Amino acid sequence: MKLRRFSCALLMLALSSSCSGTEMAPAPDVGRLDAGADGGARDAGRDAMAADGGADGGASDASLIDAGADGGNDAYVDHCLGVVCTASDDCHTVGTCDHATGVCSMPMAADDTLCTLAAGPAVCRNGTCTLRCADGSRDGAETDRDCGGGCAGCGVGLMCLVNADCAASACDSVSSQCVSSQCIDHHRDGTESDTDCGGTCTTKCALGRTCGADADCISGACDAITLMCVASQCNDHHRNGSESDTDCGGGTCASCAVGKSCSLDSDCTTSACDAITLTCVVSQCADHRVDGTETDVDCGGPSACSRCVVGLRCMLNSDCTTGHTCAPATHLCI
């Protein structure tokens, strides 16, 4: 529309010159305007559109850009029209478009930005998605460089927070460094019954330390009630060692009371261990065995036991029941 108005103006000028008999100068190039006072040429199309001011409702072409004040009439296309810049991957951010080429820049994402790899957790390093556990630095939940915190266990001397951070499954609770064994990590773990003792540790627990079995204790005695190491198996509230019953008998502990288990007369306070029930009874005269001063099972001798009946062993006539004697040759009551 603007160019049409400009052409009409030129036509009117030509007609006016012809009618007046004046020689008409050559028509100017429709693509240019006369040089201004500063000698610079201007793009006719641009000036014509500017002069119109948009009265005809037409939008100016944003892709045409003035070539400058050097008198040139070249124009170039903005190659970014219609271009939408996007991030190429997790390790790059949205860039900006170069108007001359239409190419988007690709800024790198900050290091340690999370990214996705099928092999496992990953972070960005210099614009490349790298497995977090193999990126050469301590990051994420790692307790030391590329180890711990879900990565492979750390070696001895490297930093840790929990046993799982260490290859040896032993994180020293004092130094927060991996050590070679749970038996020296200053806290109770693994099979230990108390801190760094008992269980599979070679170090046994001292008196007063927690235990789960006699083998956990230096004394070999773990109290069954308190679950603490005590000085002797004879007061640990369970039958162990050579005991015939709990904390009694066996030749080392005190003798057992009547009704307690026994193996020998010496296990019992009454010196009478029943040979059938293997329990302590009140008297050797009722323990179903020859013991004490008896000449036969529970009879004879100077004790208060019953006299022996015919056929049982004797030493004296007094060992036999009334009316019977002890045969000198056989030492049997007859």
Image: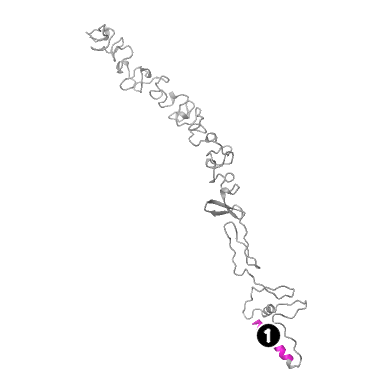
Q: Residue at x 73, y 92 (%)?
A: 18
Judged left or right of residue 44, residue 124 is left
Q: Which residue is drawn at 68% across and 84% down?
A: 6
| Residue situated in front as seen by the camera: 194 or 170 | 170
Judged left or right of residue 270, residue 14 is right
Which amino acid does the dot numbered 1 rest on? Ser
| Residue situated in front as seen by the camera: 102 or 81 | 102
Look at the numbered disc 1 and give the secondary structure of its residue.
Answer: helix
Residue 63 image point, x, y percent: 64, 73
Judged left or right of residue 298, residue 234 is right
Q: Residue at x 74, y 90 (%)?
A: 17
Alpha-carbon neighbours of circle 1 within 10 Å: few (<14), some, or many (≥20)?
few
Q: Give the residue pinned by disc 1.
A: 7
Give above or below for 330 relative to 100.
above
Give above or below for 262 relative to 129.
above
> Is 7 colored magenta in this rendering?
yes
Residue 74 image point, x, y percent: 69, 74
Residue 310 image point, x, y percent: 23, 12
Residue at the outermost top position: 328
Q: Which colour scheme is used?
A: one colour
Overall secondary structure of the magenta section: helix
Q: In which quarter of the image is the N terminus?
A: bottom right
| Residue situated in front as seen by the camera: 180 or 289 | 180
> Is 55 colored magenta in this rendering?
no
Query: How many numbered marks are there?
Result: 1
Which segment did they paint magenta? 1-17
Q: To which quarter of the image does residue 93 belong?
A: bottom right
Judged left or right of residue 254, residue 19 is right
Q: In which quarter of the image is the C terminus?
A: top left
Residue 271 image point, x, y percent: 36, 16
Give above or below for 231 relative to 295.
below
